[in-house]
Each structure stands twice: as C-alpha cells, then as structure tokens.
Image: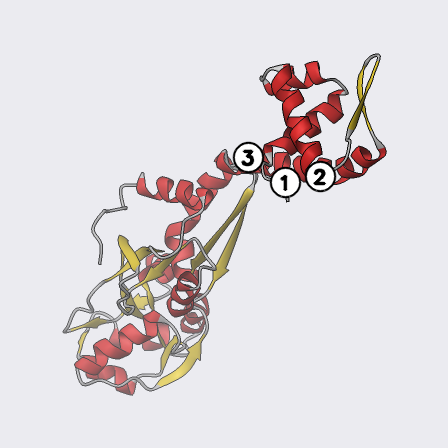
Amino acid sequence: MVSNLEYYKVFYYVAMQKSLTLAAAQLSISQPAVSQSIKQLEQEVGTKLFVRTSKGVKLTAEGELLFGYVSKGYEQMELGEKKLAQMRNLEFGELHIGASDMTLRFYLLPFLEQFHEKYPKIRVVVSNAPTPETLQSLRAGKIDFGVVSTPFGEDSGIRAVEVREAEDVFVAGLKFIPYKNKTLDLQELERLPLIVLEKNTSTRRYMDDYLGKNGVVMHPEFELATSDMIVQFALRNLGVGCVMRDFAAEYLEAGQLFELRFNKIIPKRSFCVVTDSRNSLSMAGGKLLELVAGSSGYRTDTR
C-alpha cells in the first residue's frame, strides 16, 4: 500500500488534465510538488506511470491500469463528500420516528407537516406502534426519537421531555343514558360492559394500575387495537369505552356520546418526546426536534 494517499490524488489530477502545470493549478500547489509526488508514487509502485509528450504527459499502459481503479475510488470519495454536504443541508436523507396512533395524531402530525414543507426531500419513516415497542426501537437505534405516552419504565439512557397532557375518560352512547350526570363509584366499572385497548399499550397498563390501586378490576367486553375503534364501538352502544378524551371530543360535543363521572378523578398523563443518549441523532432528527422545541408545549424538564 502506498505510504501517502495524497500521491493518488495528484496522480488522478495529472491523468485527468494530462498536464503537470494544469494539475498543479487545480490542486493549488506548485508544479515541482506535483512532479515530486508523481516520482514518489512511481517509486513506490515500482513502474513508470507517465511519459512526457509535446503537449504535456500521457499515461503508460501501467498508468492506464492504475488510473482505472484510482479514478473510481477518487470519484466515489468526491461523491461521498457531496452527499454528506447535501445531508448536512437536508437536501436528502431519512428521518425515522416512533409514535403511537394517539401521539402521532394529537401531537406529532402538525410538526411533520411543517417539517415536510421546509425539507421536502427528506424521507420521513414513521413506525406506528404502542409505547413499549417505540421505546424498544429507540434503544435498538432503529428510530431517531419517539413520541410516547406515560407511564413507561425508567431507563438511565432515555431522556424524556413532557410536551402535553393526556386525559383518559370513559364514554358511552345513548343506551347508557341513565348513567349521565351521575357521580359514580369506580367500582361500578366492574359491572359495565367495557371496551378497552389491548394489554400491550401504555394506556391499558395505566388504567389497569390506577383502577387496581382503587380495588377495581376491569372485565372488558371488547379489547381492541385502536382507540378510534373503541369510539366506534361506543357509538353503537356496544359498551362503555375507555379512551383519551381527544379521540371522542367531536362526539362528546355533538351529544352522540357522554362522559361518565366518578367520585375519584382519574389523574392525567403526559405525552413525552424521548431520545436515547446512547445513540446519535441524525441531522434531520435534530431539525425536527428544533421545530418541536419552538412550540409552546415543549418544556425542558426531564423525567
């Protein structure tokens, strides 16, 4: 292997320009320096690479062979530098985010819209999954950052910033109108046909834990994959749905659903932007977080 790779750079420019003088001008060095580099390279590879002509220099057969390989390598390095500059300027690249249906729809989506308008050439890949899966992807370095809902387990490498509150409610349709405007005991939930999320979600875990601390165990009639479906089931009077208020807001305002009231207030939760200090954040990921940080809902406190 040649001791100084700079010799190959000089060799490339001399071969391209077919002139020591023009190569020196391109490289912003002196012609003697170019001549010396070519001489050193020829000594190290053990063969003549150029012959002089009346118009400059030309490659020998051995030089042609070497140039075929050097040109590919040098041009790939130049392309790599160009692509790196484009990535720094967000002219291309990918951004990987993890979010649940809830956090994507009610927090992240407006920021993605702004980001896409500002950086249309960045490909955005959103992994739509519950909080536990999003955190697992973050730890594995598969996503730049995630937007999740509490609660979730502590991890010394995960930085979580609360960005907005989330409120869980129980909603029902007209079939359950006798329960409207009544203050119910949480124990009543054990006697109602409940519609809840599957157990692999932070929302379900939170509600199970909260009710369990109050001596209540849910016996769901339906366990569904999405909150949107819970709302649709509730609209059809198939049971009492447990969802974040935002999912049912339009139906509550329209009077198609009503919210059950209890003698104990269900504590609010939070949406958090989570990053992993053990994995580097991409340039695109950093720019999107800058947009998020510019919003009034983004706070600097950590958990």
Q: Is residue 132 above or below residue 4?
A: below
Residue 167 visible (yes or no): yes
Residue 131 drawn at (x, y percent): 38, 66
Tag 2: Cα neighbours inside 10 Å, few (<14), some, or many (≥20)? few
Mark 3 and mark 1: Cα distance apart in space: 31 Å
**Sequence-earlier tag: 3 or 2:** 2
Report the mark closest to the observer, 3 or 1: 1
Tag 3: Cα neighbours inside 10 Å, few (<14), some, or many (≥20)? few
Residue 91 drawn at (x, y percent): 55, 35
What residue is shown with label 1?
Answer: 2
What residue is shown with label 2?
Answer: 45
Tag 1: Cα neighbours inside 10 Å, few (<14), some, or many (≥20)? few
* SS for dot 1: loop
Residue 20 drawn at (x, y percent): 71, 18
Q: Amino acid at mark 1?
A: Val
Quadrant of the snapshot with the C terminus: bottom left
Residue 86's label in the rendered image is: 3
- Residues at marks 1 and 2 touching, judged by CB atoms closer than 8 Å: yes
* SS for dot 2: helix
Residue 254 position by quadrant: bottom left
